[in-house]
Image (cartoon, rainbow, N blue to C red):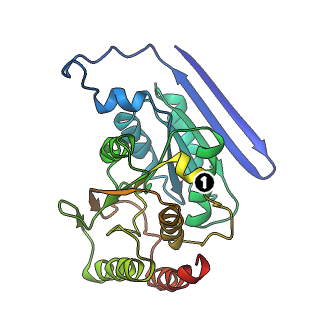
Amino acid sequence: MSLDVGIIVIGQAIAIRVRIDPPAAPARTDSPPGQETTESMSSNLRILVGICTYNEAGNIKAMLQRIGDALPTADILVVDDGSPDGTAARVATFAEANERQDSIRCIVREERGLGGAILSAMNASIEGGYDLFCNLDADLSHDPADLPRLVSAVADGFDVAVGSRYVPGGEIVGWPVRRKWMSRWINWITRFRLGLPVNDASGSFRCYRVAALSRLDLNDQPSEGYSFLQEVLLKLHRQGATFTEVPITFTERAVGDSKLDFREAVRSGWTVLRLRSKHS
């Protein structure tokens, strides 16, 4: 078993990369002959899991552990917007102290914004030649154990699998009525205005086929904040991408503060109203 730790400084960005190569895991024998398990299927694909962080030091260790448990062969990219609570340092500490099959990187940005952070991770998936790119929130509101189901859906032929709160089997735990109303309002506007074929266009728990992302001009004046999530779906839809929704349970964070407030919800709703003309 070997351990390789590196810290790269490029301009004003810091990239921390840790790779640990343990002994090969034993082959699974619990599936019928000719039937590929989700684990063996995902091991044949190059998968990048991106998580965007700001002040998630209290959640990041559990997040990385659970992603590794769910997708043992995936790479993980943490895009941190200069968290003053030391989130990036905890990523490095976790990776150094644990035997992981993954490659873990952390990019620290000076600017803040969910849209820009997800864009950085998507570009990394394209530039790295990955097959699939998965994104989920860093606060454990999305259960990493659901990742294999999203990966399986894209591996089966879809271009995008959306972890959905608003299809049968999906639910939200721990939200007040006002927060549920905001989410429903944004998604109703998105479906009505943009004609997207999904019920949950504002959630960030998704798996994308990287070949589909590579056909988009992602860097062409992208939206900021949460509205970037809707804009990516709109661009993919207009390129003819195929979609499916996988039911998930969204659980309100237990540690830290939510980054979505009423002002951000209103801004996202207004941006969605302008996206149709922007991409017409």
Query: Is any part of residue 141 visible from this angle?
Result: no
**Can residue 183 be seen in the rendering of this structure?**
yes
Closer to us: 260 or 257: 260
Picture coordinates of residue 100 (x, y %)? Answer: 46, 27
Q: x%, y% of residue 163?
A: 33, 57
Height in image: 138 above or below 27?
below
Q: Residues within 10 Å of mark 1 (few under 14, many from 20)?
A: few
Along the line of sight, which residue is nearer the eye, 201 or 183? Answer: 201
For the point 27% across and 18% down, the residue is 28
Secondary structure under badge 1? loop
Residue at the front extreme of this rendering:
240
Q: Residue furthest right?
A: 11
Q: Is residue 53 left or right of residue 183?
A: right
Is 104 in front, or is 192?
192
- Is residue 15 shown left or right of residue 40? right
Q: Is residue 41 left or right of residue 224?
A: left
Q: Residue at x 60, y 54 (%)?
A: 215
Tell me the quadrant of the picture where the C terminus can be found.
bottom right
Q: What amino acid type should be assigned to the residue bearing mark 1?
A: Arg
Classify 7 as above or below 89: above
Q: Which residue is mark 1?
A: 215
Location of residue 170 by image quarter = bottom left
User: x%, y% of residue 159?
Assistant: 44, 51
Q: Residue at x 38, y 40 (%)?
A: 155
Q: Name the residue rendered at 46%, 32% in the picture.
A: 45
Q: Nearer the viewer, residue 44 or 204?
A: 44
Total number of numbered discs in the rendering:
1
Q: Position of residue 36 (x, y in %)?
A: 29, 26
- Which image quarter: residue 67? top left
